[in-house]
Image (spheres, rainbow, N blue to C red):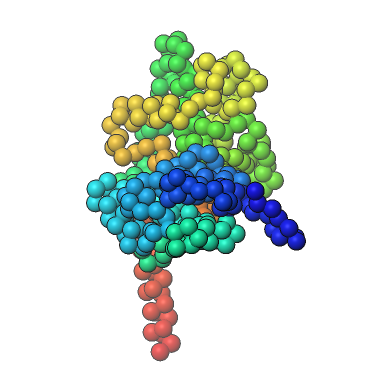
Amino acid sequence: MCGVSNGARPPIAGAARLELVDGVALLHPEDAVFEAMLSGFAKQQRGGRRLDKKTVKGRDGQLRRFATFTNEYPWNWTAAHMDEWMVSLISEKGLSHSTLRSYQLTVRLFCDFLISPAYEWAAECEKRFGTHPVQICHEWNTVQHLTDYEGQGERRPFTREELQKFFDYCDDRIDVAARSRRKGALAAYRDATLFKVLYGWGLRRNEGCKLGLVDFHRNAAAPELGRYGMLQVRWGKATKGSPPRRRNVASVMPWAVEAVEDYVVNIRPRFGVPDHPALWLTERGGRLQPREVNDRFTSYRDAIGLPPELTPHSLRHSHVTHQIEDGADPKFVQDQVGHRYASTTAIYTAVSGDFMNTMMRKALDRAFERDADWGGTG
């Protein structure tokens, strides 16, 4: 039993004194202490940092794999072990930049936990093993996080011609289903509208699927758009271990507002579940799922012969690219789509050749005008 006297601070969740019973001999002390460390780290993440159980479990697995690779306990880990593990993960498994950084972050946080005096693990290791853990992840041996986008490089936005072709086909599917008097007409109308919303507001697929009727509201700066002047995104992409990030997205494409208003007023009630909070409903009365969006998108894309690198996320890319081409302020676009870094918005932007030529021509004209002014005053 550990007592606290004379105003001493009690141990905090995850501390060595709470995970190991003082004075009790351990049959296999190294294994027991390692398990206690992992247990304490899990409690520190769940209690103090309020992390999701899935995140905590994933980090536990990463640490166990690292320990198996090194064949050492944490108090014997070195920076060289980290270097060797990274080489192995790259050469043998071919893991992505973001996955490598995730593994490194887990080890760094675990080491920070172990060496913190508040948790007393360093002192416990000194007492039992004559050594103590150290931080093995440093700036010089870990992947740097320069942007918050590390997606596949082959993904790209639609060209304007491809986008028009895609939306035309979406609308054609509605007409075909309606003429055939099949149940699929409602789903086709819903999906066509959803794709227009993903593009019109620059949303991720998951953000779009989780929209609710209450997420649209008025924008005093755009009264002509009625209750669709602003969109609140409640399920924005979260950083690892954090809750979803919210943002408000101003409506900037009136035609997209008209499309979603028509769907809400004329189509959604026909699904027969008026009390359901979701914006996008299935014919069985549930919420539309991302995999269903993928399936519909893929079938449409392939039917009209568009390239396979186009995905639902390409609609978001297209929003960014076309807004920049149309003269929107890059900072405004960055805030609209929820990018923390301007460099991420730049990665999303793949402006067309015509736009690049127009910008080049303007830059050259300005340069020639300056040269003429300087020449006239020389």
Would you identify the image quadrant in which residue 167 lies? top left
**227 sits left or right of 193 in the view:** right
Residue pushed farthest left? 91
Residue pushed farthest top? 181
Expressed as whole percent of the image width and height from the top left, the position of residue 350 reads 37, 52
Q: Is residue 250 visible?
A: no
- Residue visible at 34% across and 38% down in the picture: 310
- Residue visible at 27% across and 46% down in the picture: 93
**Residue 123 to residue 55: above or below:** below
Q: Nearer the viewer, residue 349 or 304?
A: 349
Expressed as whole percent of the image width and height from the top left, the position of residue 215 reads 63, 36
Residue pushed farthest bottom? 378
**Residue 374 to residue 149: above or below:** below
Expressed as whole percent of the image width and height from the top left, the position of residue 162 reads 35, 38
Q: How many marks?
A: 0
- Residue visible at 36% across and 46% down in the picture: 65
Q: Nearer the viewer, residue 140 or 343?
A: 140
**265 sits left or right of 195 in the view:** right
Q: Nearer the viewer, residue 344 or 269?
A: 344
Q: Is residue 365 visible?
A: yes
